[in-house]
Image: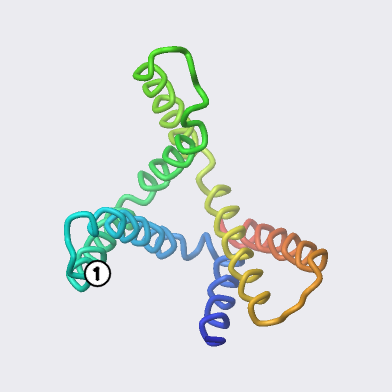
Amino acid sequence: MEWISIISIVVGVILAFFGFKVQKAVISLAWFMIGFGISNYICPNFISNEYLILGINIVAGLILSSIGFNLEKLAVVIAIAYFTYSCINGMINIGEPTVNFIIEITISMIVGGISLLVFRPIIICVTAGYGTSLIKANVLSLINPVPSVAVLVASIIVFGLGILYQFNTTK
């Protein structure tokens, strides 16, 4: 399956260096994967036909992808809020579980809202980071063994160059 690794490296380069320019496609793909994944997690509990599950997963992915494409900034706010919630979930322990939950959700929504103020840097850093990650993982699958220090240094260089290039070529 070398061709999958090569395609993944190409996608990684596109994300690392042109992520902000292809952000709608990236956001749509991310939300498709979220919808597909959530559906794939829930459906097997109720449905046993794997083709029906696959169809439902694709439809769920397409629905969330469409929402993400059309409501791009809202989708980013929700994604950042969800990420924040997943990071702080269980860390606030004031006493009553409901109060803790409300505080965690409130903090998550505030962080999500603040993300609109730094929308461009967030998209650039996330796409550069994810692109670098794709490149690294797939280069490692094609070339073994590679010294870990070399991989780390190369990853940092690609990540930094991707961010610099995107900031210099986008407005």
Find residue 41 and report its image quarter. Answer: bottom left
Position of residue 114 measured from the top left corner of the image (x, y, whole percent): 49, 33
Q: Is residue 23 left or right of residue 75?
A: right
- Disc 1 element: helix
Is residue 142 depicted above or below 126 in this figure?
below
Give the amino acid at mark 1. Leu
Position of residue 37 measured from the top left corner of the image (x, y, whole percent): 34, 58
Find residue 156 and report its image quarter. Answer: bottom right
Work out whether residue 39 or residue 113 is closer to the camera in this orientation and state it. 39
Residue visible at 49% across and 36% down in the picture: 84
Residue visible at 61% across and 75% down in the picture: 138
Residue hosting label 1: 54
Figure quadrant of the C terminus: bottom right
Position of residue 160 measured from the top left corner of the image (x, y, whole percent): 72, 58
Position of residue 100 measured from the top left corner of the image (x, y, whole percent): 42, 19
Is residue 142 depicted above or below 39 in this figure?
below
